[in-house]
Image (cartoon, grey):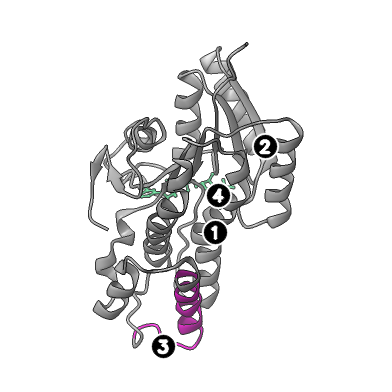
Amino acid sequence: MEERMQTALVTGANRGLGFETARQLAQRGYRVLLTSRDEVAGRAAAARILREEKAGRVEFQRLDVTDTVAIAALAKRLSDEHILVDILVNNGAVALDGFDEGVARKTIDTNFFGPLRVTDALLPFIPDGGTIVMVSSAAGELSILSDSLKSRYADRGLTRDALVALVGKFVEDVRRGRHGAEGWPTSAYGVSKASLNALVRIMAIELAKRKIRINAVCPGWVHTDMGGPGAPRTVAQGASSILWAALLTNDQTGGFFRDGQPIPW
Ligand code: NAP
């Protein structure tokens, strides 16, 4: 029987770390579903990898992680074309300027609920033993939270519903101007990544029976549009931190890593 080609799907892959991760996976022989919310940019990125790498299979798929219709269309394509996703890299995210209810809502919707929605929708297409990477950030370290919030986030008994309620409370506290009093920092980005990390710990338990590994990674401070020109790490260095977790074959799950080394939650 012909061996099935291993497939990887990367969100927010039209530029930055997502693009480089998609490029490196294609280089390693994966069929890559390069997803982007912008069709023109995504198609151009896929074409660039095909042109520069010559080998490999890179296909564009439109995907805005905040758009449930687009996520359902992706799931339908996977079903119709019998595609299994061996590696899912939830990379797409925003780091918005300012801090108010709108920023908090959009940041949480993209950086926390985006990966949650995409992962849940794609789980039927991830084979047992598959790999999920949540691209997170040290900016989401629990030390940004008050002691009381920290202990709720770090609680091993934290459920998915309780986490979603906590995240909703953050947005509501910002709306009411109560975030400081309630122990939240003035960084929606930081809260979104702390929440994503908590989700990784919860999902690792949920997915253990299918031997699907899920880990959070920090790429370090990387010279991309988000990281800015002063960042010390190259895109290739940042992407290799992501690749390490994407290419794991052991039973490591539920961790937070940079460059293959565990880092504090
Ligand atoms: P970037 O250059 O700003 O790229 C962000 C990517 O996310 C873009 O492709 C963007 O698409 C996409 N995106 C934003 N909103 C989206 C949505 N709703 N649906 C789908 N895609 C969306 O950032 P980066 O530096 O490569 O960051 C990649 C990941 O690394 C992020 O998760 C980030 O939080 C994390 N990270 C970065 C650094 C750093 O120093 N750069 C440090 C720690 C963690 P558009 O082109 O359409 O906007």
Contact? badges 4 and 1 (CB < 8 Å): no
Q: Disc number at residue 61?
A: 2
CA separation in Å, label 4 and label 3: 31 Å
Q: Which residue is mark 4?
A: 119
CA separation in Å, label 3 and label 1: 22 Å
Between marks 4 and 1 in the image, the one whose residue lies nearer the viewer: 4
Determine whether the beta carbon of the residue marked 1 sits less than 8 angstroms from the nearest atom of ligand 1: yes
Q: Give the x, y percent position of residue 155.
A: 31, 69
As shown in the figure, which amino acid type bears the numbered disc 4? Thr
As shown in the figure, which amino acid type bears the numbered disc 3? Arg
Q: Which residue is mark 1?
A: 110
As shown in the figure, which amino acid type bears the numbered disc 1? Thr
CA separation in Å, label 2 and label 3: 40 Å
Between marks 4 and 3 in the image, the one whose residue lies nearer the viewer: 4
How dense is the environment of label 3, judged by Cα within 10 Å: few (below 14), some, or many (20 and up)?
A: some
Q: Give the x, y percent position of residue 126.
A: 56, 38
Q: Indicate whether residue 171 is drawn in magenta.
A: yes
Q: Earlier in the sequence, mark 4 or mark 2?
A: 2
Which of the 4 image quarters holds residue 183? bottom left
Q: Is residue 103 above or below residue 61?
A: below
Classify mark 3: helix, strand or loop. Answer: loop
Q: Residue at coordinates 36% horizontally, 68% vertically from top-left? A: 157
Q: Which residues are magenta?
A: 163-180
Residue 85 can be seen in this image? yes
Q: Which residue is mark 3?
A: 178
Q: Indicate whether residue 33 is drawn in magenta.
A: no
